[in-house]
Image: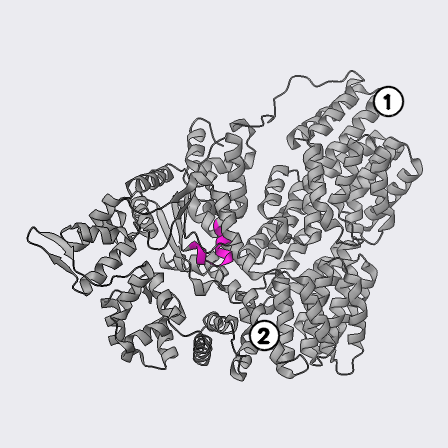
Amino acid sequence: MPGGASALVGRDAELLKLAEWAEDLTAGTGRAVLVEGEPGIGKSALVRTVVTVAEAHGCQAFWAEGDELGQALPLRPLLDALRARELDNEPRFVTIQRLLRGEVNAGADPTVAACEQMLTLLTELCSAAPTVIVVDDLQWADAATIGVWEYLTRLVDRSALLLIGIVRPIPQRDELDAVRRAVGEPGTVRLGGLPPKAVANLVTAIAAGSPGEDLLRLADGAAGNPLYVTELMEALLRSNRLKVNGSGTVEVTGGPVPDSLYAAIAHRLDFLPRDLRGTLQAAALLGTEFLVSDLALVLNSRIVDLVPAIDEARTAGVLKEAREKLAFRHPLIRQALYDDIADSVRPAWHRDAARALAEAGAPHDRVARQLLAAVSAPGAGPLDEALLDWLAEAAPTLIAQTPRTAIDLLRQASRRSPASTPRGAVLTCRLADALFRSGDHVKAERVAHRAMAVITNPDLLTDLHWTVSQCRALAGRADESFESLARALTLPDISARHRARLLVMTARAHRDLGEVTVAGRVAAEALTTAEQTGDSWAVAWALHVLIIVSMMQGNVEDALPLFERALEVVEDDTLLTDLGLLLQINKAVALGDLDRYDDALRVAERVRDQADRSGSLVRLAQAQTALTELLFEVGRWDDAQAEIETLSDDFKDPGVTCCDRGIAAVIAFHRGDPATAREHLRLAAPSADKIGNRVIASLTLARSLHHEINDAPAEALAELTACVTGHAEELDEMEDLLPEAARLAAQVGTTGTASDIAAQATMLARQSQVPHRLAAAAYCRGLLDRDPALLLHAAERYDQAGRPLLRAKALEAAAITHVGRGDREAARAAFTTADDLYSHLGANWDQTHLRASLRRYGIRRGPRAKHRQAKSGWGSLTPTETKIAGMVAAGLPNRQIAERLVLSPRTVGTHVSHILAKLGVRSRIDIAREAADHVLT
């Protein structure tokens, strides 16, 4: 086998190029590289040499390997690479493992959640030290690993990451086409055959002498493939076909020679004893790497009895050590042995291997690997009873780890066991769950709906209703669940426990449709029933719906004791961990509604970190949105934008997407960037179509601003009043619209509307003495009455509440009212403070409008300190970005920066990206250079 210096003969140019890129890495410059070539051409040996160079320069390196039989196992190559570097105790590594074992409710496809965790972990590692990540045999890697690799190509321009993929030209895969496009020609190194001189040098090294013309002619038939040359030469040595003539030249004697690389490898295997060959074929079933214990199970043998065969295979150059496993020295050796198994025998042998592993209690993924190979082969027989029973028991873990593999197996199993049978009912229920988790909500709903017609087991029936109701809610069709849920509630075999759960689903559907009063009534019934049965799941979920109802009706104080009660229920129940996260998210929102922003931010930051560590993408997205809302309200708009950008909309439910995009659009409108704002509104539109009658305040405000900026204040007012008057049940969302509605009503001159709005604001203030409600009442009444004292009082209350934008609006209105009454001094004072607030927020549109309004009365700003106006360079950095830049310059990785600033590592990564873009640099080292020229605070 090629290795060491002999494998690099003739590769000076390629080695120099890769070595230069490795040196660039030590200076903080990353790159994505594909090393492409046919099997045996020397790709891995070349890259290993470069990795050694990088490690010698202080870089950390991770080597992953794709496996043809392991393509059903998400992220396995990357997990093995991290485990080899003893990083399997890293919190995110543990979370990934738990996600793939089904121990965490990710709220989405667990593979997607695990990929997000993997990306964050690798990004954190890159921020700690220059990093090389290699994926060998990328063409055999699972789709998740390829997806992570492709995503990392987008980060190399701003990370100290040398990302290398080693790939064959075939097989062709769509995922690899995306990888090739991402890397492009400049990053692709194609290895062709060695030139004749390099082949001659390699032959000389192996033959330990100068080759003759016949031997060189024979070697030329290897087309410059170093593995082929090596195998050919070793075949000749094994056959005693080389001799040294009188002049010291090595010549080849007559006889047949291998006519291909595959034949040369087969020649090596032909020399193995029959029994050893059979043992190696069994090993080939298990993959390129395998555990000796698994091989013993497949062969029904003791490990001690396998030792002689393993030693012989290692001596023959067929097997090698691979940490705690054994591995074939080259994938082509394993492929030759595997292909030599008769087509009619191979599926049955895989099935027997699956049964042996299952009976021994092997991890589910290893059993599934054999089972999938057994059922996917042409002419494969059906699963036997033992394996069907195993699948019914193992399905939950298998669904979490490899949902698509689980779907393939469960579909075949369901054909053998119809849903009308006890085992078939379990398998069908698990199939619906697998389809839902994989994101195929249409098929999940179809399978579950059909099964509900024949399944009578109450536990399974309740699970199916949960799946169907979630599918319909996500599709914006929550109302379609009422009929089936009502029918289920009348079934004679439904116990009080199941009734409580079905009522919870019914209440959630009403809440999703904005039918708040009905949702509260049904949730109260569910709670009473659940408490009678002692079902903590239903108790906690019913309390959660009641909390949401209280908040939507504006009774936030009433929700606080319900939070404490619900959190106590979920505290020690691992099955309710996900709900515990959701409760904390809503508690943060509630505290914000009470203007307890310090407490609210602490709770939001804590639950954001808990959701991140848990691996739940859905809860992480919701926690970040809650935090985003709070940051926006207290005027930390740049930090709010960073939180919005941290996660893709793909990981967010429709309501969360609408809220995030709404906030982003509102910020853009206020900052005088209508094009960006309109783009956010466009991106929100598909999600807005799915939320029924729900009001999302930020999205409604953004739509209103869109009309106002286009000189259509009446349409802007109509956007708000439609929600204020048409959705009276949703007071939590509606009350955020009242101040803007009052302002626009005063501007348009619709006194009746302004009076109605002021009355609603006054009513809310009477119900609660929360500062922002008192402020809103004074603001709306002050606009209606043109009373500057009330408007200034509103500004004071908004200041107490910690809401700078609304405080500035109240001061702006007070300034205009004062100047209209001839009190220029009071007008100037209010104008100056409002102008400063707008400047601090970066609200250029509002500031321009304010100045234009007061300029007509001869009131202008005097000399003052300039706030941040630059769009690029050091002066454009936000306060948070400046702090992070200083910490990057001090050499802190993202994780430590996150801990110091109470941010998530993802958010820190987003800020670092912004810093790099604003400074126009590529690496953390460049940030340090820029920081050295500035005073950091």
Disc 2: CA contacts within 10 A as few (<14), some (14-19) or many (>=20): some
Secondary element type, mark 1: loop
Q: How is the image coloured?
A: one colour
Q: Nearer the viewer, residue 767 or 406?
A: 406
Name the residue type under label 2: Gln
Q: Is residue 145 magenta?
A: yes
Query: As displayed, is residue 175 above or below residue 278?
Result: above
Query: As displayed, is residue 450 above or below residue 663?
Result: below
Q: Nearer the viewer, residue 923 or 608?
A: 923
Name the residue type under label 1: Arg
How far across and down, in percent of the image, does residue 107 sit?
A: 62, 61
- Most frequent secondary structure within the magenta stretch: helix
Q: Say whether marks 2 and 1 touch (CB < 8 Å).
A: no
Query: As displayed, is residue 397 above or below residue 144?
Result: below
Q: Which residue is mark 1?
A: 821
How far across and down, in percent of the image, does residue 83 sit?
A: 39, 59
Q: What label sits on residue 412 in the rendered view?
A: 2
Q: Is residue 743 magenta?
A: no
Q: CA distance from mark 2 to mark 1?
A: 81 Å
Quarter residue 2 falls in: bottom left
Q: Is residue 633 visible?
A: no
Q: Nearer the viewer, residue 271 or 927?
A: 271
The span picked out in magenta is 138-149
Disc 1: CA contacts within 10 A as few (<14), some (14-19) or many (>=20): few
**Image check: 718 left or right of 394?**
right
Which residue corresponds to the image point at 60% horizontal and 62% vertical from the top-left? 438
